[in-house]
């Protein structure tokens, strides 16, 4: 008997350790956690959900930045989205980094070495600008090279703390940067934020099929957990040589790139951003690429994409208000 | 325990390919290394423990293959020009290639243990283990499961920035 048939039953999704079905669903058979889950709470802790809801009540819009594939520019994009939105001084922006093993946001935002302070109202985010606050596990490490070697449950605990204990205050936009994959961090953030609401997800990719195949899985993840997809951003999409102005495809879109994938899966392509070595340089130096290279074609692309995301969020909010 | 010893007992060296950072070329290097070692006449296997984003099957153009069982366990898929590189990946176990594997740690750990103990690798000079980015469940479980065997060491992959 082909093994795949046997295993396809056990490949059904984990209902979630906090779900009412925890330990009891068909997919739980054979899972080493089954006993713990079945013996645990009958469902998500209502007191906890209430706590999260209260803390997140003052957040108007939440955007998750996802991929599936690593190294495509999620953190870069999250940081630039935050900078772009915070350029409007009347908006309060929060950037939450839930990549526990590889937190890039402190370096990209120029905040390495900063620490988190506690006050009566909770943990204080680290402020880049008056209207742009950041939180990351990176700020909790004694040394930037310390490895956070944690299994899922411990990571989930910290993510919950980030949402429950950080005093973000009134926030117009909460941007959540995630690690690659479709695992604990992603399930947890969607679960915990269900206490509030998520406007949608921005999915980042690069043009080659090896990236797209992981990104299609991420799109399916979003559909499975009913997370709206704002759209897809294709990074590293072509390179224009500053000397000879010739364009090269460093990551050739052998299967049609994000454009074809978006057509096939009926999701919006928010934009394509070309490779610009200044992007990597700005990230390493903790400076905003948008500010350092305002004339770059990549900056123009990013700004267009950021505007489309803003429009989506505002429209979404307007529709919700109409319903209410 | 006897079966466990048997399945990896014929493997001379186990190499982990790690990074921490995603998208730096771990799977690419794992694949090229396997092909190069095979070209040099070695017996090679690849174990892909990236459960959320398994890249190796597509890189070796076997994404539509299926896994079968034999007396000593699961039979790896044989890839490469002479079909002599043994490969195991969750990619072969998905009903559809775009299916997301949305598992929490404990379930990932269980499958990784199975990949290590239940795959009939046979006699290999090198088993290359491709990993996902990070330092979490997959990495802890893989190292724990491989500890009793000939773990040669880790190759770390990065990019310049």
Image (cartoon, coloured by chain):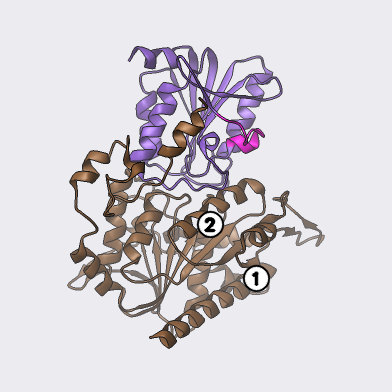
Chain colours: A brown, B purple
The part of the image, by quadrant, that contains residue A280 is bottom right
Which quadrant of the figure contains the C terminus of chain A?
bottom left
Q: Is residue A277 above or below residue B4?
A: below
Image coordinates of residue A259 in percent, x first then y, are 68, 61
- Residue lying at 62% horizontally and 15% vertically, measured from the top left: B42
B26 with respect to A49 (left or right): right
Marks 1 and 2: same chain?
yes
Q: Which residue is mark 1?
A: A301
A265 with respect to A74 (left or right): right
Q: Is residue B114 above or below residue A120?
A: above
Image coordinates of residue A255 in percent, x first then y, are 71, 50
Which secondary structure lies at badge 2?
helix
Q: Which mark is residue B98?
A: none
Q: Chain of mark 1?
A: A
Question: Is residue A167 among the parts visible in the rendering?
Answer: no
Q: Which residue is mark 2?
A: A219
Overall secondary structure of the magenta section: loop
Q: Is residue B113 above or below residue A92?
A: above
Nearer-the-camera pick, B20 or A13 = A13
- Residue lying at 36% horizontally and 39% vertically, measured from the top left: B107
Q: How far is disc 1 from disc 2 in space, using C-alphas? A: 22 Å
Question: Is residue A135 among the parts visible in the rendering?
Answer: yes
- Residue lying at 69% horizontally and 50% vertically, measured from the top left: A251
Q: Earlier in the sequence, mark 1 or mark 2?
A: 2
- Residue lying at 58% horizontally and 72% vertically, measured from the top left: A290
Q: Which residues are magenta?
A: B56-66
In the image, residue B69 lies in the stretch drawn in magenta: no
Which secondary structure lies at badge 1?
helix
Label 2 crowd bin: few (<14), some (14–19), many (20+), radius 10 Å:
many
Image coordinates of residue A63 in percent, x first then y, are 45, 69
Q: Chain of mark 2?
A: A
B123 with respect to A157 (left or right): right
């Amino acid at each position: 008997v082909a093994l795949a048939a046997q295993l396809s039953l056990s490949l059904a999704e984990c209902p979630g350790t906090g779900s009412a079905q925890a330990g009891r669903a068909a997919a739980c058979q054979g899972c080493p956690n089954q006993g713990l889950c079945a013996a645990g709470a009958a469902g998500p802790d209502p007191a906890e959900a209430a706590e999260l809801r209260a803390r997140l009540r003052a957040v108007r819009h939440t955007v998750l930045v996802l991929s599936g594939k690593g190294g495509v520019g999620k953190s870069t994009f999250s940081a630039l989205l935050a900078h772009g939105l915070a350029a409007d001084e009347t908006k309060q922006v929060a950037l939450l980094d839930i990549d526990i093993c590889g937190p890039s946001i402190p370096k990209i935002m120029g905040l390495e070495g900063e620490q988190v302070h506690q006050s009566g109202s909770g943990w204080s985010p680290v402020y880049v600008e008056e209207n742009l606050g950041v939180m990351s596990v990176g700020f909790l490490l004694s040394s930037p090279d310390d490895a956070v070697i944690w299994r899922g449950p411990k990571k989930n605990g910290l993510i919950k703390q980030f949402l429950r204990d950080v005093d973000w205050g009134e926030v117009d936009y909460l941007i959540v940067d995630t690690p690659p994959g479709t695992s604990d961090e992603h399930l947890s953030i969607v679960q915990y934020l269900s206490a509030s609401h998520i406007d949608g997800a921005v999915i980042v990719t690069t043009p080659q099929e090896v990236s797209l195949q992981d990104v299609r899985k991420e799109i399916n993840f979003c559909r499975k957990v009913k997370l709206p997809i704002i759209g897809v951003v294709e990074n590293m999409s072509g390179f224009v040589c500053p000397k000879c102005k010739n364009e090269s495809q460093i990551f050739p879109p052998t299967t049609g790139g994000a454009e074809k994938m978006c057509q096939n899966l009926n999701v919006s392509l928010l934009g394509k951003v070309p490779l610009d070595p200044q992007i990597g340089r700005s990230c390493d130096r903790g400076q905003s690429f948008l500010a350092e290279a305002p004339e770059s074609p990549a900056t123009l692309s990013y700004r267009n994409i950021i505007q489309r995301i803003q429009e989506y969020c505002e429209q979404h909010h307007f529709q919700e208000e109409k319903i209410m | 325990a006897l079966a466990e010893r048997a399945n990896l007992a014929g493997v001379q060296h186990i190499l982990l390919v790690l990074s921490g950072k995603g998208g730096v070329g771990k799977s690419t290097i794992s694949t090229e290394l396997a092909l190069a070692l095979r070209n040099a006449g070695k017996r090679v296997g690849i174990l892909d423990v990236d459960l959320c984003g398994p890249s190796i099957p597509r890189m070796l153009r076997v994404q539509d293959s299926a896994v079968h069982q034999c007396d000593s366990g699961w039979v790896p898929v044989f890839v490469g020009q002479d079909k002599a590189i043994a490969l195991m990946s969750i990619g072969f176990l998905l009903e559809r290639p775009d299916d997301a594997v949305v598992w929490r740690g404990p379930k990932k750990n269980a499958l990784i243990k199975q990949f290590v103990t239940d795959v009939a690798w046979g006699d290999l000079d090198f088993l290359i283990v491709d990993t996902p980015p990070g330092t979490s469940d997959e990495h802890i479980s893989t190292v724990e499961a491989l500890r009793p065997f000939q773990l040669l060491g880790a190759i770390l992959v990065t990019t310049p920035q």
